[in-house]
Image (tube, helix red, strand yellow):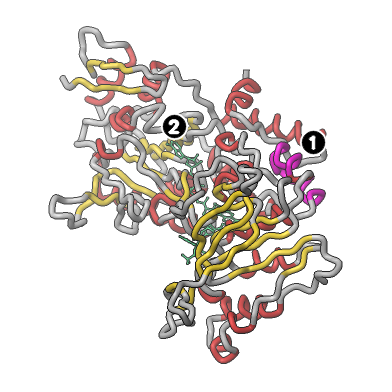
């Protein structure tokens, strides 16, 4: 018999003789018996790692199309929904309507939610494998890209948009961020995607407009004291290459008492180019040219889109070493041979002297918003998965099957029974609708593979080798690791308590900001 080493996060190292009959615990005996009597009548057990939109939409499809499937969804937080809860801005409640669909999925008797388990850390992936017929990774992107400039690692006044977004949305990881919004009036955001615009909008919004939303209470408190008056959203390329979309720009342009610095005509593409653009880009360029109707003389705050600037370094006051004063930027110019293409490249702009051109922008707080990043789960390699660190995703065939890397580096075969969906499959871009389409594709692939496997059911294991127990088999291992998992009923209780707490202050909900608070509330 093989020895299996189970490493739990609580620093417990258990070397357990797997399936040894003499000393076998009752649950292991049950597991072994089941694994030898796999019948074609048993359900198909599918594990989903991550309870964001990708996980839920995949579960929805699997449960509706594969009638004998039981889906166990593992989530590292005690509560579900990933970025739908902790990413989508609090003033976009309509986007969170996708949670209605997720609640419907969770009401299926063939669905289990297992929260508060960080797969790969709290519970090794090796603990899942024996009990499932297929594993789907949809664990998103839990880190962000860095710029690699001096000063970026400062402990104060320099933040990733991911941390700031997590902070205002009540994500426990960033509960203690405490952004300094009072030392100065100038915020600089690097990156011109929709996340950057979310950050800008939250900084510029009248705090009273956020009071009734599900924004974290601590964020509301800090934002109510904010002295930030000016927000610059800085891109390294031009308007035509910006990643944001029209709806999000329009929202900022319509914020009451917030003016917009007009974009210099020379930066916007000429009219004949604009007229030839696809409709969404054409409308976006026209909107940028039109700007805002709010009068800068009467507006209390302002914002700008600054183009063709790459951050070089951050600078602090010599008198007050914790006070960020400015960011130094290198000026760029678009490749003159291709300036109107979305893929246009930039190079440093040179002065007539041949030297590079720089500009300083006042900054009392600095955010980088240059994209999220997925990391490999510990233990992926034990399943034969070679995470693509360069692209930040699990290598796959586009339909969701995890690719197997062969010795000669060609990616031509798949790892049976292993799948991925969402941001960890495509990289950290795409809205909830595109994540849904992508998750459906992966679920359809699983169904297709199950159909091809016929009565064998298990896609990971050889016939008869899977315990077929799913969570019932994993549970004892989780308990031996000392884990306190949460169920869907636990989440419903937390949800009800949050709504109750919120109601007292006229809010949609008042989120628990720490994992311990959630678990205490359950006790
Ligand atoms: P996620 O939503 O990140 O879900 C991944 C889940 O996996 C999380 O719950 C995470 O806790 C869990 N997990 C991670 N590691 C583990 C582990 N080891 N074990 C168990 N579980 C784990 N789209 C829109 O359509 N409209 C918007 O307004 C919008 N706003 C956005 C705002 C922000 C700030 C961001 C970043 C994105 C926004 N999006 C929006 C995009 C949308 O959120 C994504 O398309 C979608 O959430 C991606 O889904 P996912 O399931 O792949 O990842
Ligand atoms: P994104 O859309 O990929 O934008 C990233 C931005 O960072 C781009 O402007 C990019 O510019 C810039 N960037 C990257 N590396 C850089 C560097 N080294 N230096 C300077 N700039 C750099 O990513 P995101 O804003 O994180 O959004 C992620 C996804 O979530 C997107 O699909 C977005 O639409 C979605 N989202 C949607 C909403 C919504 O619907 N309301 C809200 C938030 C997020 P280059 O192009 O030059 O690389």
469 or 510: nearer the viewer? 510
Is residue 401 found left or right of 303 in the rendered image?
A: left
In the rendered image, which residue does mark 2 sit on?
Answer: 118
Residue placed furthest toward the top: 22
Q: Nearer the viewer, mark 2 or mark 1?
A: 2
Choose top left, top right, bottom left or bottom right for residue 13.
Answer: top left
216 within the magenta span: yes
Point 55% across, 40% down: residue: 155
Q: Name the spot of residue 462 as percent of width and height, x first.
A: 19, 36
| Residue 491, numbered label | none
Quadrant occupied by the C terminus: top right
Query: Is residue 113 visible in the rendered structure shown here?
Result: yes
89 inside magenta stretch: no
Give x and y (percent) for residue 483: 46, 21
The boundaries of the magenta stretch are 207-222
State the residue at coordinates (69%, 51%). Answer: 93
């Amino acid at each position: 018999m093989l020895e299996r080493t189970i490493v739990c996060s609580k620093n417990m190292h258990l070397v357990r003789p797997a399936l040894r009959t003499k000393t076998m615990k009752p649950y292991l005996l049950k597991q072994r018996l089941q694994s030898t009597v796999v019948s074609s009548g048993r359900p198909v057990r599918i594990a989903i790692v991550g309870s964001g939109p990708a996980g839920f939409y995949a579960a929805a499809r699997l449960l509706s199309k594969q009638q004998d499937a039981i889906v166990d969804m593992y989530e590292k937080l005690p509560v579900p929904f990933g970025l739908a809860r902790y990413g989508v801005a609090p003033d976009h409640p309509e986007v969170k309507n996708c949670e209605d669909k997720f609640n419907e999925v969770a009401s299926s008797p063939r669905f289990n939610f297992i929260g508060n388990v960080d797969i790969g850390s709290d519970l090794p992936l090796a603990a899942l494998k024996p009990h499932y017929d297929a594993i789907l990774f949809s664990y998103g992107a839990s880190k962000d890209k860095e710029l690699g400039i001096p000063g970026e690692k400062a402990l104060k006044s320099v933040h990733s948009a991911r941390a700031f977004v997590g902070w205002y949305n009540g994500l426990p990881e960033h509960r203690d961020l405490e952004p300094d919004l009072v030392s100065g009036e100038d915020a600089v955001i690097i990156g011109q995607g929709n996340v950057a615009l979310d950050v800008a909008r939250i900084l510029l919004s009248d705090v009273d407009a956020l009071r009734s939303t599900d924004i974290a209470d601590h964020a509301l408190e800090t934002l109510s004291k904010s002295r930030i008056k000016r927000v610059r959203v800085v891109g390294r390329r031009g308007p035509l290459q910006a990643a944001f979309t029209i709806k999000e720009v329009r929202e900022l342009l319509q914020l009451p008492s917030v003016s917009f610095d007009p974009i210099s005509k020379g930066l916007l593409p000429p009219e004949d180019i604009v007229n030839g653009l696809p409709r969404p880009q054409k409308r976006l360029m026209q909107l940028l040219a039109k700007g805002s109707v709010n009068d800068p003389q009467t507006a209390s705050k302002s914002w700008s889109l600054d183009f063709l600037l790459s951050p070089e370094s951050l600078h602090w006051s010599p008198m007050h070493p914790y006070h960020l004063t400015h960011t130094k930027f290198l000026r760029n110019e678009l490749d003159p041979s291709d300036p109107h293409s979305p893929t246009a490249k930039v190079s440093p702009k040179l002065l007539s002297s041949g030297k590079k051109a720089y500009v300083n922008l006042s900054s009392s707080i600095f955010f980088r918003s240059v994209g999220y990043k997925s990391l490999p789960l510990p233990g992926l390699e034990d399943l034969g998965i070679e995470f693509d660190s360069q692209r930040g995703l699990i290598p796959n065939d586009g339909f969701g099957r995890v690719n197997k890397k062969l010795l000669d580096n060609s990616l031509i075969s798949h790892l049976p029974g292993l799948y991925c969906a969402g941001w960890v499959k495509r990289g950290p871009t795409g809205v909830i609708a595109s994540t849904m389409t992508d998750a459906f594709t992966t679920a359809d692939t699983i169904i297709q593979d199950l159909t091809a496997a016929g009565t064998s059911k298990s896609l990971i294991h050889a016939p008869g080798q899977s315990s077929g127990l799913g969570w019932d088999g994993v549970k004892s291992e989780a308990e031996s690791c000392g884990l306190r998992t949460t169920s869907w009923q636990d989440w419903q209780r937390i949800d009800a308590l949050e709504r109750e707490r919120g109601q007292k202050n006229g809010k949609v909900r008042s989120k628990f900001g720490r994992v311990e608070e959630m678990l205490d509330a359950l006790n």
